[in-house]
Image: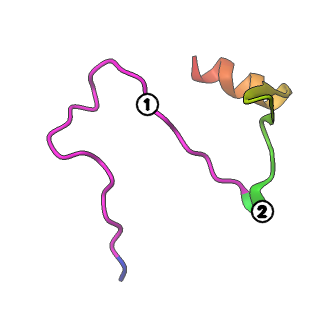
Amino acid sequence: MYKRRSIRLKGYDYLQTGYYYITICTLDKTKLFGTIKKNEMILNKYGMIAKDEWI
């Protein structure tokens, strides 16, 4: 059985307040949440739902 290597920083407290990057992978790189125009994310209705739920 293959074991994945953790990408977390050893000794870092992930419960502390801060900014985190999250990557979501989709099948065939489908743009489910919107598009990027001029380096800005333009959310579609599903992107707005995801944002509202996240917040």
Residue 34, placed above or below residue 25: above
Which of the image's four quarters has the N terminus? bottom left
- 42 vs 5, left or right, is right
Question: Does 5 appear in magenta?
Answer: yes
Residue 29 image position (x, y, % from top left): 75, 56
Q: Position of residue 32 (x, y in %)?
A: 80, 42
Q: Quadrant of residue 48?
A: top right
Sort mark 1 into few (<14), some (14-19) or many (20+) by Cα contacts within 10 Å. Answer: few
Please identify the quadrant where the C terminus is shown. top right
Observer-nearest residue: 44 or 40? 40
Task: Tell me the element at label 1.
Answer: loop
- Percent x, y of residue 30: 80, 52
Residue 29 versus residue 8 in the image, above or below: below
Looking at the image, tell me whether mark 1 or mark 2 is earlier in sequence order: 1
| Residue annotated with mark 2 | 28
Q: Which residues are magenta?
A: 3-26
Residue 54 percent location from the top left of the image: 58, 23
Amino acid at the residue labelled 2: Asp
Q: Residues within 10 Å of mark 2 (few under 14, many from 20)?
A: few
Distance from disc 1 to disc 2, alpha carbons, whole Å, reads 25 Å
| Location of residue 49 (image quadrant) | top right
* Residue sitting at the far front: 38
What is the total number of numbered labels drawn onto the structure image?
Answer: 2
User: What secondary structure is found at the residue carrying circle 2?
Assistant: helix
Q: Which mark is residue 20?
A: 1
**Amino acid tagged 1:** Tyr
- The residue located at (85%, 26%) in the rendering is 45
Residue name at image x 61 percent, y 46 percent: 24
Q: Residue at x 79, y 28 (%)?
A: 38
Residue at the farthest left position: 11
Colour scheme used in the picture? rainbow
- Asked if the residue at tag 2 contacts the one at tag 1, i.e. Cβ–Cβ closer than 8 Å, the answer is no
